[in-house]
Image: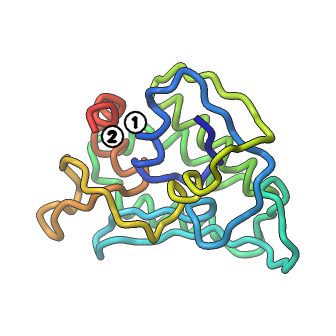
Amino acid sequence: MILIPAYLPPISYFKSAINQNKLSICINTNYQKQTFRNRCIIYGANGLHKLTIPITNNSRVKKDKDVTIHNEMQWQKNHWRAIESAYKSSPFYEYYQDELAPFFFKKQKFLFDFNFKILIQILKFLNTSIEIKETNQIDDISKLNQILNPKKKSTNFKPYNQVFLEKDGFQSDLSIIDVLFNLGPETLDYIRSL
């Protein structure tokens, strides 16, 4: 399976990859705006909350590997506060917070590198043994773009307990951290059951 690293991608992203022995990360694609490359969706007290990593504005077509993060904004601090506010009362927030927090305090120059590092950490959280390699070729970019498209019709996955379930009902296919913080070590089994 070929993927592009995304920012705390949705459960459907991992559903596509989790049963693979090998995962290829494409390093030669063009950056697409308004995708999960630089955004994710979490579930907070006020409903769904979109977190977007600001990127430097450059009108030239860029390769994913060349997109730089606009670190002059305090996006990391704001994102960590939003994540903490949304999930600090979830059953497994404390279990993962110490290993996730550094991503929100150490600046990264390139979006691709940041996303790749956070993807590796999430795969460690999931306790998977997927071999990851880089590739320059992709056969079907449209399938990849569909996985990364936040405007696609949301998949209705089977419900699990969420922090604000009683307030707003179950919200499906959110960022992987939603299921991690709520199901903890059972996350991998949940994804495999979808």
Which quadrant is the N terminus positioned in?
top right
Identify which residue is drawn at 58% across, 52% down. 144
Which quadrant is the C terminus positioned in?
top left
Residue 149 in the image, given as x and y percentages of width and height? 52, 64
Residue 36 in the image, given as x and y percentages of width and height? 56, 61
Q: Quadrant of residue 142?
A: bottom right
Question: Dot 2, how many residues are within 10 Å of its Cα: few (below 14), some (14-19), or many (20+)?
Answer: some
| CB within 8 Å, label 2 to label 1 | yes
Q: Quadrant of residue 58?
A: bottom right
User: Under tag 1, what secondary structure?
Assistant: helix
* Disc 1: which residue: 95
Give the number of the disc on residue 92. Answer: 2
Left or right: residue 65 versus residue 166 is: right
Left or right: residue 185 versus residue 13 is: left
Image: 145 above or below 5 = below
- The amino acid type of the residue labelled 1 equals Tyr
Spatial CA distance of label 2 from label 1 is 5 Å
Identify which residue is drawn at 73% across, 57% down. 111
Residue 73 in the image, given as x and y percentages of width and height? 71, 75
